[in-house]
Amino acid sequence: MKSIFHLLIAFYCLTVVEAKENCVRIEVTNPMDMERTEVVSVRWSEIKKIMPEINSSEISVSEVSSENSIMHQLIDENNDGMPEELLFLANVKANEKKTFYVKAGKKETKPVISLTDARFMPPREDIAWENDRIAFRIYGPALAKEVNNGIDVWTKRVRYLIVEKWYRGDEAPGDQRISYHEDHGEGADFFSVGRTLGAGSCALFKDDSLYQPGVFETYKIITTGPIRAIFEVTYKPVEYNGRKVSEVKKYTLDAGGNLNKIDVTYICSPTEGNLVFATGLVKRANVTSYKNKDQGWVSLWGQTNDKIENGYLGTGIVMPAEMIDSIKEDDVHVLIIGKAKPGREVTYYAGAGWTRSGDFNNADDWNNYLKNFALKLKQPLKVSVK
């Protein structure tokens, strides 16, 4: 009997050792006094240092307190077959440290329902993207004579993905057509962009004038999900201060949020000196503007359109306060003005929130979301790999 007991103990110890050897521990610490749910990013090279033999196609991610795996995503931005990043969603309470395990040799078998998407949509040649909260689009060459580089907003009442469905419904012939400009229970495209910046696009700026580049010229879908969508677009050069300046813009949208991360790089020769640029929000009828330069955000809030049953819509931009030179407002836009060095990336965040999504009740809710988002940028989650 004793020998059986000792064998069981030995087997248990071997199992524990093997489990530890086949996993990488990731500690996520929230330094703030507020709960937050965010996508955690870990360099894949850090995981490979600890477990060189790990196969990225056969892993699972779980909390230490649970054997149940959580949704994860691998990013291979340069398409070399080796991921650069591992992503997973983490809910971390105020001032909490939470441990996650990346386990090797365990391939996920259950179907994954993506929370994000990005796609090129012919024949319109839009790029449309979304998450479980909100959707957006920008316009391509087919609409070059009608629009510019503004960002359109599609408001959603559901948590599942709708972009492809709405496009196909709107393109259906005759009586089968279902217009995405009307709410059929899932939300709609109520937003009007025209030749403006829409919900947070940007342009070079001089003498109170925007130098918009028109619609995008080329695009690259980097990843579509399930928890992060990324794509990149390029624009034709504009004449600015005697130089031809072209633009590369990368959009990133994570599950669970309302703001896009927007990385902009201006390219020109010579490269000396700064370029002045503006990012802005188009004013709809009867909106109220809110600004806080010290906290690094601006917003607009008002009725979604002329029908009260369609609720209220907020648009907003968050930019690190140290990057903001000034905030301007005219009849068309509220603008954040900043500087960019040619060839160096500038990052800001822009998006929208709708009352009928269930996430925001009023302007205070929306502005607090922007304020807290700005605070989180200053105090990011601390991630360590062990």
Image (cartoon, rainbow, N blue to C red):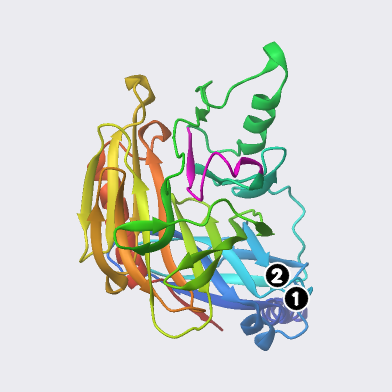
User: In terms of depth relative to the viewer, which is nearer, 297 or 96?
Assistant: 297
Query: What is the secondary structure assignment of the residue under circle 1?
Result: loop
Inter-mark Cα distance, 1 to 2: 6 Å
Q: Report whether residue 4 is seen.
A: yes
Residue 155 colored in magenta in the image: yes
Which residue is identified by label 1?
82
What is the number of the mark on residue 373? none
Q: Residue furthest bottom?
A: 49
Residue at x 68% of width, y 71% of height: 103
Q: Report whether residue 132 is seen.
A: no
Residue 74: x and y in percent read 67, 66
- Quarter of the figure that contains the C terminus: bottom right
Residue at x 33% of width, y 36% of height: 284
Query: Which residues lie in the magenta part?
Result: 142-156
User: Quick one: label 1 or label 2, which is nearer the N terminus?
Assistant: 2
User: In terms of depth relative to the viewer, which is nearer, 246 or 249?
Assistant: 246
What is the number of the mark on residue 76? 2
Residue at x 46% of width, y 39% of height: 194
Query: What is the secondary structure assignment of the residue under circle 2?
Result: loop
Q: Are marks 1 and 2 in contact (CB under 8 Å)?
A: yes
